[in-house]
Image (spheres, helix red, strand yellow):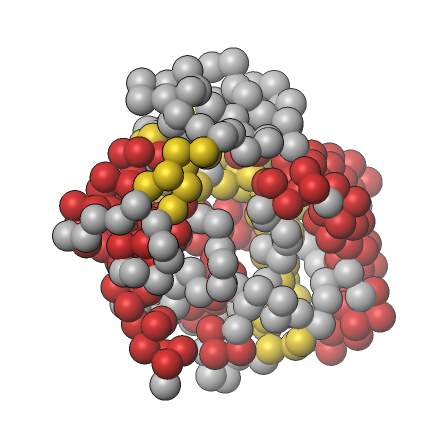
Amino acid sequence: MTVLVTGGAGYIGSHMVLQLLDRGEKVVVLDNLSTGFRWAVPAGVPLVVGDFGDEDLVTELMTRHEFEAIIHFAAKIVVPDSVADPLGYYDNNTAKARVLLQCAVEAGIPHFIFSSTAAVYGEPKTTPVREEDETSPINPYGRSKLMVEWMLQDTAAAHPLTYVALRYFNVAGADPKGRTGQSTPNATHLIKVAVQSALGMRKGMDVFGVDYPTPDGSCVRDYIHVTDLVRAHVDALTHLRAGGKSWTCNVGYNKGYSVLEVIDTVKRISGADFDVRIVGRRPGDPAKIVASNERIRSLGWKPEHDNLDEIVRQALDWERGLAKRLAA
């Protein structure tokens, strides 16, 4: 049986493909390459260039391959962009996901793993936030993802499909073997921006607000290594294959770092200083969000890279290598 990975040429998706291959799984990638790269898909893995919302293409793809599961990463993910372009986010993240899900049901694909987000919680009333806590997203990005969770719940109740929705916290780092990493130009991930600033690829960086109700005034996030994140998908797939119930799980480390703490870590690990500009808050940013992770641990998941220094070091190594690749 084969696993379809949508967005498999992108940052997290390419790590997922490697993890599946390392386990001996058969994989097909569907990616429109808007933020992904052909070179990020390993040799021998079929890459179908197209949109996951293209019903004819997806139907043909599912007819041609016997998929056991879909792991769905493809999405728009930038919170401020979602505030500026809500309809674009609802179209890409929600409406197209409905098409993909419909095709999966019609093809009889039994398992679906969905890349959701901690943004579905909005401003959590408790820390760490638990899966059963209120979902009240404060930006279109979070709403677009929560709508897909609702669709999955309703679809699983009506059809023979089981799913796991994984609510990511802040994904960072790179493959420890140096095979892939965050490569999107102008990416907004904090650690990538800070690393590029340390390497002189950016003229410093902005911190969006230091007036939040946190110890140093900057936002606090739970930063999870991308390799630990994709292993959570493997554990979710194992759970579903064993007949496990549909579930929603946080994926994070149950601890947080502030923006300023992350910047200080990048400066210390890189040995470089760079300009840090304090500017106003961005729309849609919650002050603090940290994961409760007991539920994903109950599926056998155990962090192996829960170390901010390691995450930063690997991000630096990847960025240096990527610069050489692009210059070649």
Position of residue 75 measured from the top left corner of the image (x, y, whole percent)? 64, 53
- Residue at 59 percent across and 48 percent down: it is 77
Count of numbered marks: 0
- Residue at 33 percent across and 41 percent down: it is 276
Q: Is residue 42 left or right of residue 302?
A: right
Between 94 and 316, the one lying in front of the other is 316
Position of residue 76 measured from the top left corner of the image (x, y, whole percent)? 63, 52
Looking at the image, residue 238 lies above or below residue 317: above
- Residue 262 occupies quadrant: top left
Name the quarter where the C terminus is drawn: bottom left
Position of residue 123 measured from the top left corner of the image (x, y, whole percent)? 55, 21
Between 200 and 83, the one lying in front of the other is 200
Q: Is residue 152 left or right of residue 34?
A: right
- Residue at 51 percent across and 29 percent down: it is 281
- Residue 175 occupies quadrant: bottom left
- Residue 32 occupies quadrant: bottom right
Inspect this view and state whether residue 2 appears.
Answer: no
Name the quarter where the N terminus is drawn: bottom right
Inspect this view and state whether residue 80 appears.
Answer: yes
Q: Is residue 126 left or right of residue 306?
A: right
Looking at the image, residue 2 lies above or below residue 327: above
Between 299 and 266, the one lying in front of the other is 266
- Residue at 15 percent across and 52 percent down: it is 271
